[in-house]
Image (spheres, rainbow, N blue to C red):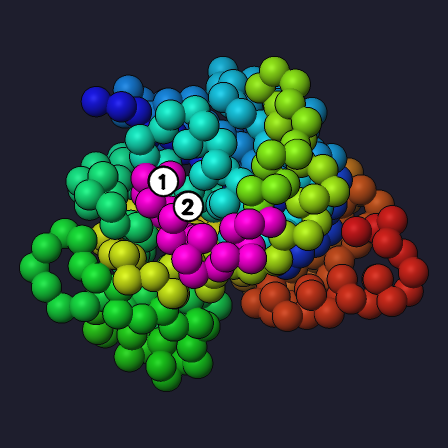
Amino acid sequence: MAKIIPVLMSGGAGTRLWPLSRRAKPKQFHALGGEHTLIQDTVLRFTTEAFGPPIVIGNAAHADLTRAQLGEVGVTASVLILEPEGRHTAAAACVSALAAAEAGAELMLLLSADARIADPAGLRAAIAVGAPAARDGSLVIFGITPTGPETGYGYIRGEAGDGAARKVAAFVEKPDLATAQAYVADPAYSWNAGIFLFRPDTFLAEAARTAPELMAAARIAFAEAQRDGDTLRLGEAFRAVPSLPVDVAVFERTDKAVVVAADIGWSDVGAYDALWAEAEKTAAGDVLRGPVIAADTANCLAVSDGPTVVLAGVEDLAVVVENGVVLVTRRDAPGAVRAAVDAVRKAGREDLL
């Protein structure tokens, strides 16, 4: 049986984890407390016989970093697609599907390179469950079993049915707390983690139907890309591809989408509160990394890459010292981190981003 080709989208900026995550080294290239970096963990999930070497698509500025980090865990990408700038996930999906089709892939697994999954074997089992539907021409999306009323994630509502792959009835963007609580109590709803499985030809045909201008621009960018061995360098034509999420461009507009349940312990580790929640804590609930001293504190996250940080008499803070920048904010306030990034930009300090 033909192998499934994982396609890792590695173009995320991880703004909510600034200053740990920056343009030169966004969050997928950080370990964030684990043994491996997030991109390394992602490729290592798919080193079994069922999967072929991955395709990786990301920013051209991270080409050497990507190769180095994959090489550290003994993985070589079959194709490394380099973007001159990020154009969101629909553009990445279309170009990657063209590369996968060119390579003769029967099935392509599309996912981000910057999420954490506690149960990789569970993910592989869910992929095996979804593979027959994908081979039959469905666009499979894996619905993550919610662990709480998360308001920062999108949700999928599946139609009623007993089969493993249920028709997608609706996509719902980030709900308010009361709505999220109702979704968690309803087995029809699951989190949308942006993990997809499909035949490249099926996806390309649907993308041409649901987003014809985007697909046409992606084909031009792919055709004009410079090739050097396993590297495909997208040029200026890629900047003309409309910037849309693949959910909006294709999955919300197709009648071929089905959802397969995946109870796999998924987290996008997208904010300091999520990083704190997953980490080992002191008796006071603190997460302390690097030269950090804490006295009379509770539920704080403190990370330093060098200078000693001393916390005293505070609660629920995130204090991050990284490459000459110090951030102090509430641990559970990802919007405040975005505001900090905007303030840095308005101050003319793009060098800090």
Tag 2 near tag 1, CB within 8 Å: yes
Going by the numbered disc 2, the residue's amino acid type is Leu
Quarter of the image with the N terminus is top left
Residue 290 visible in the shown view: no
Q: In the image, which disc is placed on residue 201?
A: 1
Choose between 307 and 26: the one closer to the eye: 26
- For disc 2, the neighbor class at 10 Å (few under 14, some 14 to 19, many from 20) is many
Q: Is residue 127 visible?
A: yes
What's the residue at 65%, 18% (across, down)? 228
Who is closer to the viewer here, 338 or 87?
A: 87
What is the crowding at mark 1: few (fewer than 14 residues within 10 Å), some, or many (at least 20)? some
Question: What label sits on residue 8 in the rendered view?
Answer: none
User: Which residues fall within the magenta stretch?
Assistant: 194-217
Judged by its main secondary structure, the magenta piece is helix
C-alpha gap between disc 2 and disc 1:
5 Å
Secondary structure of the residue carrying tag 2 is: helix
Residue at 62% from the left image edge and 28% from the top image edge? 232
**Could you say which disc has been placed on residue 204 in the image?**
2
Residue 81: horizontal and vertical position, in percent?
59, 32
